[in-house]
Amino acid sequence: MNTNVSSFLLQLYLDSRELPLEAFKQSVMVQLQKVIQFDSALWFTGSTVTEHAHPQNVHLYNQPDQMIMNYKAHQTDDPLLQALITQPGTSFNILDVISYEDWIKTDNYIGHCSKFSIEWVLSTLLLEEHTSLFHAVSFYREKNNQPFTQQECQLKQLLVPHLVEAMKANLFIHIEQAREKKVSNDTWVSAVCDHRGSLIQADKQFATLLSNSFPHWQGPELPFKLQEENLGKTISNEGLLISSEYKGDMLFIRVQQAIGNFNPARN
């Protein structure tokens, strides 16, 4: 795996935790440009049961909103569609399924692709049989660009499952945060410790929040002691709300800024 791909995957999973829902897919598309070049793209989640598409499930990159509506009028002549349905999980270059000469004669090309500067297409469809949901990710290049290569096709096939799983993580993390904000406007940040209170894993924001209240703390030991009688409870310590509970032999810690104790001078 080359350095660009490794860096992309690391950033992808960081963004899934840290970026808001409305910014995540756009950021992914921007970061993907460092791995596979494309001029525009579509990221679509739909259902094999209903044709109704929720707007939040359609993300267009460098394409106008009317592009997806125009496609519906010309999708029956899409030579890629049947290949994607027949072999979900496989990435297809448009030239894998039809010659260029035949491609430019199709209604899909004439009535749709040519109108939106789409000359070359690289598409992947993932199917979730247990939910009847599918995820389609398509990259597009304009006429003055080169067709997608077989190497790019294979790389995209490797990356798309990561995109989908990171997208789900981003969604569920923010569902949990939204639930917590019904109780408080501040966000909880998390860490996992061993039974001695030494960090095993932690959110980036966890270290920032602890450093605000404990300026000289560097880890990995927690800067406060957790008393046995306080496990499973939420306590206050140095301007922080601290919640802790055991999960097997690991200690789960969640921390939030206590109301009225934020000191901007420490940021």
Image: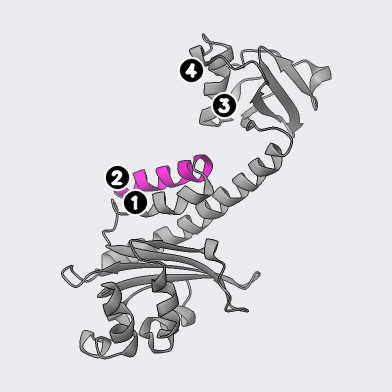
Q: Indicate the quadrant where residue 124 lies.
A: bottom left
According to the picture, the residue beneath numbered tag 1 turns out to be 30
Quick check: marks 3 and 4 in contact, CB under 8 Å? no
- The answer to whether residue 193 is left or right of residue 2 is right
Mark before the other along the chain sequence, 2 or 1: 2
Residue at image location 39% in from the left, 72% down from the top: 67
Mark before the other along the chain sequence, 2 or 4: 2
Mark before the other along the chain sequence, 3 or 4: 3
| Amino acid type indicated by mark 4 | Asn
Q: Which mark is nearer the camera, 2 or 1? A: 1
Q: Magenta part mainly helix, strand or loop? A: helix
What separation in Å lies between label 1 and label 4 (alpha carbons)? 29 Å
Q: Where does residue 165 sit, x and y in percent of width and height?
A: 53, 55
Find the magenta span and give its range.
3-18
What separation in Å lies between label 1 and label 3 (alpha carbons)? 27 Å
Mark before the other along the chain sequence, 1 or 4: 1
- The answer to whether residue 183 is left or right of residue 97 is right
According to the picture, the residue beneath numbered tag 4 turns out to be 267
Q: Where does residue 254 sit, x and y in percent of width and height?
A: 67, 29
Residue at image location 57% in from the left, 79% down from the top: 51
According to the picture, the residue beneath numbered tag 3 turns out to be 206
According to the picture, the residue beneath numbered tag 2 turns out to be 3
Quick check: marks 1 and 3 in contact, CB under 8 Å? no
Quick check: marks 1 and 4 in contact, CB under 8 Å? no
Instruction: Identify the element where label 3 is drawn.
Output: helix
Question: With respect to residue 254, does 210 lie above or below?
Answer: above
What separation in Å lies between label 3 and label 2 (alpha carbons)? 28 Å
Q: Can residue 196 be seen in this view?
A: no
